Image (tube, grey):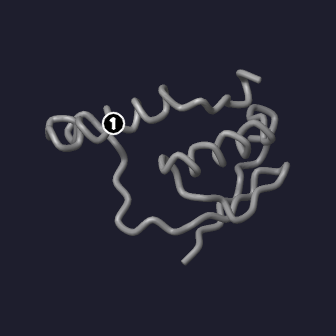
Amino acid sequence: KKVLRVPGIGSSAFVNRIAEYYNAQIAGNLGLNVHLAYSDQEGFQLSEYVTNPQTLNANLLEYEIVLKRVALMMRTLHTSKEKFYSNL
């Protein structure tokens, strides 16, 4: 299954779409994000469908397993040798 994101009107004025795509690819390669099948300059994106997604919130952070997973993801991100678009 795939999901198509349709950007809001005028949102491209506030988002660097090249950086967004580049950084999403890095996050996907690190296992921190779904892989994008398609992305364009207007903000349309086609990505893998996530079954039963949950938004991280204060209630979820009360669970030790969730907090450990977030910490592991942050370590993966911050110890990678990858350079995000704003850091090139």
Q: Which residue is mark 1?
A: 72
- Secondary element type, mark 1: helix
Quadrant for the N terminus, please.
bottom right
Looking at this view, name the residue that lies furthest to the front. Answer: 81
Expressed as whole percent of the image width and height from the top left, the position of residue 6 reads 70, 59
Give the camera-side residue of 36 and 45: 36
Left or right relative to 67: residue 31: right
Identified at 49% across, 33% down, the residue is 77
Image coordinates for residue 42, horizontal then vertical, percent: 83, 51
Relative height, residue 11 to residue 82 (above, below):
below
How many marks on residues? 1
Q: Is residue 25 left or right of residue 28?
A: right
Residue shown at the point (72%, 24%) measured from the top left: 86
Residue extending farthest bottom = 1
Residue at position x 22%, y 42% from top?
A: 60
48 is higher (above) or lower (below) than 71: below
| Front position in the image: 10 or 73 | 73
What's the amino acid at mark 1?
A: Leu
- Which residue is located at x 34 percent, y 53 percent? 54
Q: Is residue 25 above or below residue 50?
A: above
